[in-house]
Image: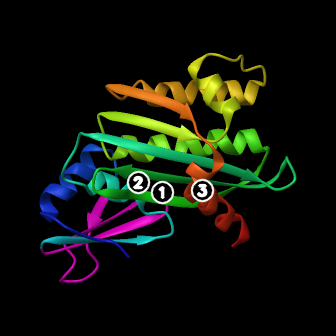
């Protein structure tokens, strides 16, 4: 359960500015509460406690610092192709791991899961308000389609590619590169752990 030391009034304003609905607290000690994508933030004097399964996007919105460069790793997994699928992502900056997560996404092909993982990583990085992003993944197909080197013939993948490009355009500078699976092992582990759970 992440605890974010911050000015709770400024944190409330950041959430409101991001379109997150903020309500009054349930007790005398709670200053306010907010829910966003399955996570709940509860504010106390000088801190906000974030709870839930997928807290990364809410944590990002509460973060006071902004800017800088982040490295994003992504991986999707599908058992059956199509079959049960999950995504994993890791965001790393100069201080270490900023955010990581894995979650199931229902039934999908492996390529659909790879795109969903990339979208999730980019959404979280956007919420953290990084200026630059260097994306790494072990799916050569996804990397080359996003860079425009290969065509995207599948309509569903084409739609996801458009979403990825929209998210990338929100950064001042971005790169995406193919890396060997062993470089991407943490994102792979998070996706497979989500499927195993």
Q: Which mark is residue 57?
A: 2
Query: Can you say which quadrant of the picture contains the N terminus?
Result: bottom left
Instruction: Name the quadrant of the C terminus.
Output: bottom right
Location of mark 3 (residue):
185
- 44 in the magenta segment: yes
Which residues fall within the magenta stretch? 22-45
Magenta-drawn stretch contains 179: no
Label 1 with label 2: CB-CB less than 8 Å: yes
The residue located at (72%, 16%) in the rendering is 151
Q: Tell me the element at label 1.
A: loop
In this rendering, the label closer to the viewer, 2 or 3: 3
Instruction: Report the residue at 85% width, 47% height from top.
Output: 81
Which of the two marks, 1 or 3, is nearer to us in this view? 3
In the rendered image, residue 113, in percent from the top left (x then y), is placed at: 69, 45
- Name the mark nearer the viewer: 1 or 2: 2
Q: Disc 1 vs disc 3: Cβ atoms closer than 8 Å?
A: no
In percent of width and height, residue 163 lies at 55, 29
Q: Colour mode?
A: rainbow
Compare marks 1 and 3 and give the one earlier in the sequence.
1
**Mark seen at residue 37:** 1
Disc 1 crowd, CA 10 A, few/some/many (<14, 14-19, 20+): few
Residue 21 shows in this picture = no
- 20 or 188: nearer the eye? 188
Relative side of 4 to 193, left or right? left
Where is residue 132 drawn, in percent x and y?
Answer: 33, 33
Of marks 2 and 3, which one's residue comes earlier in the chain?
2
Determine the residue positioned at 48% across, 37% down.
135
Secondary structure under tag 3 reads helix
Whole-Å distance between the Cαs marked 1 and 3? 26 Å
Residue at 23% across / 39% down in the picture?
Answer: 67
Left or right: 9, with 98 as reference point = left
């Amino acid at each position: 359960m992440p605890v974010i030391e911050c000015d709770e009034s400024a944190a409330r304003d950041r959430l409101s500015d991001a379109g997150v609905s903020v309500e009054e607290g349930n007790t005398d000690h709670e200053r306010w509460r907010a829910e966003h994508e399955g996570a709940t933030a509860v504010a106390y004097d000088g801190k906000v406690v974030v709870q839930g399964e997928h807290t990364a996007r809410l944590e990002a919105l509460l973060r006071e610092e902004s800017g800088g460069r982040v490295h994003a790793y992504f991986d999707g997994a599908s058992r059956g192709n199509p079959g049960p699928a999950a995504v994993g992502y890791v965001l790393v900056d100069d201080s270490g791991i900023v955010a990581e997560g894995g979650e199931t996404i229902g039934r999908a092909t492996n390529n659909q899961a790879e795109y969903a993982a990339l979208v999730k990583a980019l959404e979280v990085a956007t919420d953290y308000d990084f200026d630059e992003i260097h994306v790494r993944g072990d799916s050569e197909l996804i990397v080359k389609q996003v860079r425009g080197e290969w065509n995207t013939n599948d309509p569903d993948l084409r739609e996801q590619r458009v979403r990825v490009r929209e998210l990338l355009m929100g950064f001042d500078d971005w790169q995406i590169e193919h890396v060997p699976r062993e470089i991407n092992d943490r994102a792979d582990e998070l996706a497979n752990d989500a499927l195993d759970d």
